[in-house]
Image (cartoon, rainbow, N blue to C red):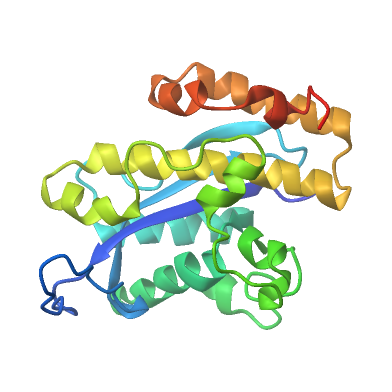
């Protein structure tokens, strides 16, 4: 029996103790803050078992919980369960941000930094599979344009719907944490579908098994009203491979 698969995505805001946004001219976009100032406010996740059957989805935070408690919960869970982490650009953003914030709060990540850690070895999909890294040949192919939004649309999903990452900070300061959590979970679910399709591409799943587990995930999120817009825009035939071409 192999490890369970934890699909992961985070949402962040700049830490005001570490960063003051530069002044910008009218109509000029603010630069993306450097990695070390990002403060996670949501760690969204979806858990598959070793056969890619959905176990649960949600996030590591809770209403009223602070950043430290959320990070400790995440670090402790992965340390105990030794789940296989799946991300889209998590090697370039999500996991380094988590590590830097654990550094700030004095939280241990022994499973991440152990000798020959599969979680940190880039060229294996054991421990941590970064789908963006694998789909761009670890940087050998041009990464520009291959966002989660783009990759999701390739397989029949709508990608970003409603809001995008540029709006997270504004929503956070407006107290709209639940909206951010729902947005994060949309990215998690679309990453989960992309994982299933990638396992089919690798030959780890055959077509019948892919249709079974992708169909089960689709049926599960159909019961959750938060995904109504995403489902309305989804090309189900392409996602479930029920049509040619």
- Residue 222 horizontal/vertical position (percent): 52, 18
Image quadrant assignment for residue 63: top left
Vertical relation: 241 (above or below) 99: above
Hey, which residue is sitting farthest front in the picture? 27
Residue at figure coordinates x 40%, y 71% from the top left: 97
Image quadrant assignment for residue 86: bottom right
Vertical relation: 103 (above or below) 166: below
In the picture, measured across the screen, residue 21 lies left or right of residue 44, that is left
- Residue 145 horizontal/vertical position (percent): 54, 62
170 and 95: which is toward the camera: 170
In the picture, measured across the screen, residue 141 lies left or right of residue 69, that is right
- Give the mark count: 0
Residue at figure coordinates x 82%, y 43% from the top left: 200
In the picture, measured across the screen, residue 178 lies left or right of residue 237, that is left
35 and 237: which is toward the camera: 237
- Can residue 180 be seen from the camera position used here? yes
Hey, which residue is sitting farthest top in the picture? 223
Residue at figure coordinates x 38%, y 77% from the top left: 100
- Can residue 1 be seen from the camera position used here? no
Vertical relation: 201 (above or below) 206: below
Residue at figure coordinates x 34%, y 53% from the top left: 165
76 and 160: which is toward the camera: 160
53 and 134: which is toward the camera: 134
Hey, which residue is sitting farthest bottom in the picture? 115
- Residue 203 horizontal/vertical position (percent): 89, 48
Q: Quadrant of the C terminus?
A: top right
- Residue 227 horizontal/vertical position (percent): 44, 26
């Amino acid at each position: 029996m192999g490890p369970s698969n934890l699909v992961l995505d985070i949402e962040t805001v700049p830490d005001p103790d570490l960063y003051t946004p530069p002044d910008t001219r009218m109509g000029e976009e603010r630069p993306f803050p450097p990695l070390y100032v990002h403060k996670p406010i949501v760690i969204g996740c979806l858990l598959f078992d070793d056969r890619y059957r959905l176990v649960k989805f949600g996030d590591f935070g809770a209403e009223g919980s602070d950043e430290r408690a959320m990070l400790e919960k995440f670090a402790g869970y992965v340390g105990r369960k030794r789940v296989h982490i799946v991300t889209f650009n998590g090697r370039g953003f999500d996991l380094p941000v988590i590590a830097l914030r654990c550094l700030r709060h004095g939280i241990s990540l022994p499973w991440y930094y152990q000798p020959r850690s599969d979680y940190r070895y880039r060229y294996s999909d054991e421990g941590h599979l970064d789908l963006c890294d694998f789909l761009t040949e670890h940087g050998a192919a041009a990464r520009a344009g291959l966002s989660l939004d783009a990759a999701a649309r390739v397989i029949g999903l709508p990608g970003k719907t409603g809001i995008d990452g540029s709006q997270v900070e504004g929503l956070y300061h407006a107290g709209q944490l639940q909206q951010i959590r729902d947005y994060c979970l949309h990215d998690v679910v679309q990453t989960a579908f992309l994982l299933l399709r990638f396992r089919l591409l690798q030959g780890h799943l055959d077509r019948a098994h892919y249709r079974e587990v992708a169909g089960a995930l689709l049926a599960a999120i159909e019961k959750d009203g938060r995904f109504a817009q995403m489902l309305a825009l989804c090309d189900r035939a392409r996602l479930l491979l029920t049509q040619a071409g």
